[in-house]
Image (cartoon, coloured by chain):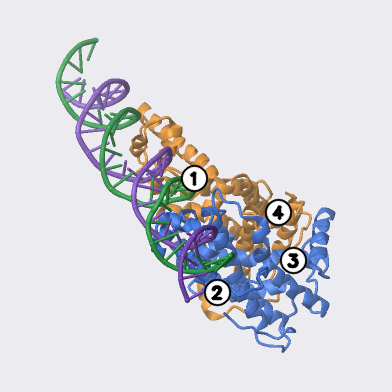
Chain colours: A blue, B orange, C purple, D green
Amino acid sequence: MPQTASAPSPKPPTPRERARARTIEDIVRLGRDHLAVHGAAALSLRAVARDLGVVSSAVYRYVENREELLTLLLIDAYNELGDEVDAAVSALPAADFAGRFSALGSAVRRWALREPARYGLLFGSPVPGYRAPAERTTGPGTRVIYALMALLDGAYRAGRLVDPGGGAAVVPPLAADLARIRDGMGLAVSDRLLARGALVWTSLFGAVSFEVFGQYGAGTFAAPDELFSHHLAALADLAGLCAADGAGERPAY
Amino acid sequence: MPQTASAPSPKPPTPRERARARTIEDIVRLGRDHLAVHGAAALSLRAVARDLGVVSSAVYRYVENREELLTLLLIDAYNELGDEVDAAVSALPAADFAGRFSALGSAVRRWALREPARYGLLFGSPVPGYRAPAERTTGPGTRVIYALMALLDGAYRAGRLVDPGGGAAVVPPLAADLARIRDGMGLAVSDRLLARGALVWTSLFGAVSFEVFGQYGAGTFAAPDELFSHHLAALADLAGLCAADGAGERPAY
DNA sequence: TGTACATCAGTGAACGCGCGTTCACTGATGTAC
DNA sequence: TGTACATCAGTGAACGCGCGTTCACTGATGTAC
């Protein structure tokens, strides 16, 4: 979890500071476990305190309240997902756009299947009564879509993202939204391809959510890996990514 | 909510039976409201009893326990969604496949935006500690996918669903799953088109979930209707539906 | 190096709250003869 | 039509539980002179 510190203290941390940091890490880790078993809505400071071997009021030394712990867990999960996606993508040559796309999708799915409760916290129904503080969570929360867009934009600039045709024209109000996004992210892709990218993004998470949340009936798909692989290939097509061109095999998850 | 009763009692219901049925309806309705405000994890029999104006133990006359109420709410929500989708689809001529597809997607989205908490119960993170009884929920729970598949299969039989090419071949383990599904649902569509249909299904719910659960950053899309409309057109393409052919305009949501 | 003080981690009791579920009960509504 | 009985709806008290959060406190760890 490389957390780019804002570095306000040039001095090395004192033993006390290090102990404190470790305890906060422990709290987040225990909260993670608790989340996995009982779900976000049932996340309880008292339970975390119990697991930490400490009286319930003690955790208030480290965490302002329950909301704060939820926020920490949210950021932690977003960053772990972001790190794994980044690692998977950059393990392939920059020019292998199709391979990188597949790696991105597979990394999301792999993390989601390994961490279903944390995935649910990020992409499932909102936790009742909790609103994530945008100023702290949007950064980590946008890492995957940034990675995807960077990938597609790179392919576009390399002439390897072609409008597949079909679909509908982009109407003006939508074009305005897309222009704002393109400027904000410094992209070059066309409106139509940008819209396709957004659809591919939501579709990827739709496929993952159905699998993780058990929306496919039990036993409907005995070969979920192959299903997802097939979906990824179709989504690459939908995005406009040109098919494999010798730059590397797509790793089937 | 036309609930095809299993009709074991030929006699008309006694006043007592009618009062009882009305009370159960009230309980489900109040549970629905409670769900909307506090989320599924916080659904409470005591709260429902309070709203019903009755002492907490009284609801146990009507509902075995909390799980049972959740199941009732699940079935109720699935059926309302299914009814609205069926109504929207059958409002258009059977031969207007593209129009019906668009109507189906728009109906799902409309219901989800109107009933975010119930949508979350059906398609969000699973409620911790609760497992839906398959024998009671799979029927209502599969109405949308059945409607979608019936639509696509109808288009296929009419020669109006064409494989768009691209993507990948269907590998044997996946083909086995698809064959089972095709037989189970009495379909005719090819493997590739069936797989596309499944992707379109998950993608539709992915797009709706992102919007309902607020995954798009606040203010990212000022024109969500147009975005969804655009996505629907792209998904129709992905499914292999031939473009509009005079059979009717697509109703933009 | 030693002492006085400040900081901090953790304790334990308490506040008020809501929950699911059980149980013996009171009355009212229906049914059988 | 009238009476005796069974069924059912709803009551009220209780069980044991967990929760978030506050507060005055004890000791240990650090810091300043």
Dot in front, 3 or 4: 4
Tag 1 residue: B76
State left or right for residue A220 relative to residue A232: left
Q: For numbered disc 4, what is the local secondary structure?
A: loop
Of A197 and A94, the residue lying toward us:
A94
* Residue B143 % position (x, y): 54, 54
Contact flag, marks 4 and 2 (Cβ < 8 Å): no
Q: Which residue is mark 2?
A: A110
Are marks 4 and 2 in one subunit?
no
- The foreground one among A198 and A10 is A10
Question: Residue B148: x percent and y percent?
Answer: 60, 58
Res A94 quadrant in image: bottom right
Amino acid found under the numbered disc labelled 3: Arg
Q: Is there CB contact under 8 Å for labels 3 and 4?
A: no
**What residue did someone put label 3 on?**
A196
Query: Which type of secondary structure does the marked residue at label 1 adopt?
Result: helix
Query: Which residue position holds label 4?
Result: B218
Calculate the distance from the C-alpha at mark 3 to the C-alpha at mark 4. Answer: 20 Å
Residue for point 56% across, 62% down: A72
Crowdedness near tag 4: few (<14), some (14–19) or many (≥20) residues, C-alpha within 10 Å: few
